[in-house]
């Protein structure tokens, strides 16, 4: 493997400059996805711009009713945050399902967003919560963030700085279906909100998505209609983790359970 | 770059994007840390960075500049006596083939540092990122529970 440079910016502005001016550079945060790809040679960057220790990207703050989570804050930080537990318990629940201690200590919300895996466990929660992605130059509503398979609204040399969760994030509920409680990549991941009506899923399409048909029915208070409409909202495939048929049935069952069933974590 | 490895200072001139795992084993010849999957699934390469358990196959060595790294070699006491946790692993038969053992010890050590009296369920969650191909989980959990303080 040719040598890959490790670039250590002083701050976000410096990181944007390095990212813009270095050919074939990639952004590195906790490395839980990128280090695997670089080692396997599936991506071949010439440099990694390391964001992990930038103070501007750390921390969890409460600003005017909105909770803002630094893009390089770890899942362990999110899990341990009283602010997030109070404001968006579903994000704590989702963060607990990511890998196990080793991954939670390094994985970040910014990394989950930038990597844009259709199976990213926090992404349906962010969609159901109407989160806002803050970058070095603008804010992007989460509903506009995921464009196509692993393609996002991020421009060249644009860096995610934080994620904002509005007050409605409190009502989001979350469920992940995987092979085991820890370490599993999801077969289906789902987050819902009643007010406003939001149904968001992962691992059932090429992007994390909002189920617009199900949401329309839910907005009318029609839970049965929402469950029925979900089948046409999603585009699951057969892959190593599950089948399209299983995913469709489970997504509908879990949605019904989250909307009708007893209150669970 | 410079970091603390098991309480000794290490200075290195290596590419900062190399995996911490490889630098430990190949450059520093500290081979207690094992490579299992190389993808962050199995936990065999677990080490502590500033007290937090991480997979060293996913860490660029440049990211530990200025940090404290502990590997399984750093768990024993300065006089070479094994830690209570290591001793419990031996006494309870918690090691079979041994490749998961260093990572299990470090994950368990981190868990006990943060939660000195874990329940069996909390031990299972704390070790959920460490796979044992011999499936010797029961003895491993027994050993950790024996070290509650």
Image (cartoon, coloured by chain):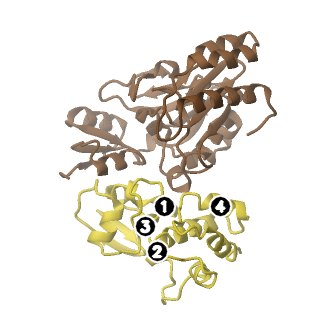
Chain colours: A brown, B yellow
- How many neighbours does mark 1 have within 10 angstroms: few (below 14), some (14-19), or many (20 or more)? many
For discs 4 and 2, the disc positioned in front in the rendered view: 4
Identity of the residue furthest to the right in this view: A262
Q: Which residue is mark 4?
A: B124
Residue B43 is tagged as 1
Q: Position of residue A119 (x, y in %)?
A: 50, 35
Q: Which residue is mark 2?
A: B72
**Above or below, comparing residue A144 to residue B51 in the picture:** above
Real-space CA distance between mark 3 and mark 1, rounded to the nearest whole angstrom: 16 Å
Viewer-closest of A1 and A26? A1
Q: Position of residue B36 (x, y in %)?
A: 41, 63
Q: Secondary structure at mark 1?
A: loop
- On whether disc 4 and disc 1 are found on a single subunit, the reply is yes
Q: Which residue is mark 3?
A: B69
Q: Position of residue B48 (x, y in %)?
A: 48, 65
- On whether disc 2 and disc 1 are found on a single subunit, the reply is yes
Residue A35 visible = yes
Viewer-closest of B106 and A215? A215
Q: Residue at x 59, y 71 (%)?
A: B136
**Above or below, comparing residue B126 to residue A78 in the picture:** below
Disc with the residue nearer the chain's start (3 vs 1): 1
Disc with the residue nearer the chain's start (4 vs 1): 1
Viewer-closest of B60 and A206? A206
For discs 4 and 3, the disc positioned in front in the rendered view: 4
Q: Residue at x 44, y 44 (%)?
A: A55
Quadrant of residue A33 within the rendered picture: top left
- On whether disc 4 and disc 2 are found on a single subunit, the reply is yes
The subunit letter for the residue under badge 3 reads B
Real-space CA distance between mark 4 and mark 1, rounded to the nearest whole angstrom: 14 Å
The subunit letter for the residue under badge 2 reads B
Real-space CA distance between mark 4 and mark 3, rounded to the nearest whole angstrom: 24 Å
């Amino acid at each position: 493997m040719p040598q890959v440079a490790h670039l250590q910016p002083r701050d976000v502005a410096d990181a944007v400059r390095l990212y813009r001016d270095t050919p074939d550079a990639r952004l590195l945060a906790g490395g839980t996805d990128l280090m695997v790809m670089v080692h396997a040679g599936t991506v071949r960057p010439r440099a990694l711009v390391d964001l992990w220790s930038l103070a501007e990207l750390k921390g969890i703050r409460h600003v005017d009713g909105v909770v803002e989570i630094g893009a390089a804050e770890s899942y362990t930080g999110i899990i341990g945050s009283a602010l997030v537990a109070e404001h968006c318990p579903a994000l704590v629940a989702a963060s607990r399902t990511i890998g196990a201690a080793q991954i939670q200590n390094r994985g970040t919300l910014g990394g989950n967003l930038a990597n844009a895996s259709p199976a990213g466990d926090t992404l349906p929660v962010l969609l159901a919560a109407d989160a806002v992605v803050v970058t070095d130059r603008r804010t992007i509503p989460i509903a506009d963030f995921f464009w196509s398979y692993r393609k996002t609204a991020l421009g060249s040399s644009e860096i995610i700085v934080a994620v904002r969760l509005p007050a409605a994030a409190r009502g989001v509920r979350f469920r992940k279906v995987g092979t085991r409680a820890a370490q599993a990549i999801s077969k289906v991941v789902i987050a819902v909100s009643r007010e406003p009506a939001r149904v968001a899923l992962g691992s059932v399409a090429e992007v994390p998505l909002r189920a617009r048909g199900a949401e329309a029915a839910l907005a009318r208070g029609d839970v049965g209609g929402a469950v029925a409409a979900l089948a046409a909202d999603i585009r699951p495939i057969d892959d190593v983790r599950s089948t399209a048929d299983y995913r469709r049935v489970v997504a509908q069952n879990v949605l019904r359970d989250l909307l009708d069933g007893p209150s669970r974590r | 770059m410079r970091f603390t490895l098991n309480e000794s200072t290490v200075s290195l001139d290596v590419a900062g994007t190399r995996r911490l795992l490889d630098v430990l084993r190949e450059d520093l010849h500290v081979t207690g840390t094992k490579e299992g999957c190389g993808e962050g699934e199995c936990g065999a390469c677990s080490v502590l960075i500033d007290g937090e358990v991480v997979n060293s196959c996913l860490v660029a060595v440049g990211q530990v500049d200025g940090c404290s790294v502990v590997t399984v070699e750093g768990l024993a006491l300065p006089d070479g006596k094994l830690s209570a946790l290591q001793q419990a692993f031996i006494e309870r038969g918690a090691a079979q083939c041994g490749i998961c053992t260093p990572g299990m010890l470090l994950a368990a050590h981190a868990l006990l540092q943060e939660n000195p009296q874990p329940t069996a369920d909390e031990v299972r969650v704390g070790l959920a990122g460490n796979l044992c191909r011999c499936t010797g989980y029961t003895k491993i959990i027994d050993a950790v529970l024996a070290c509650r303080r």
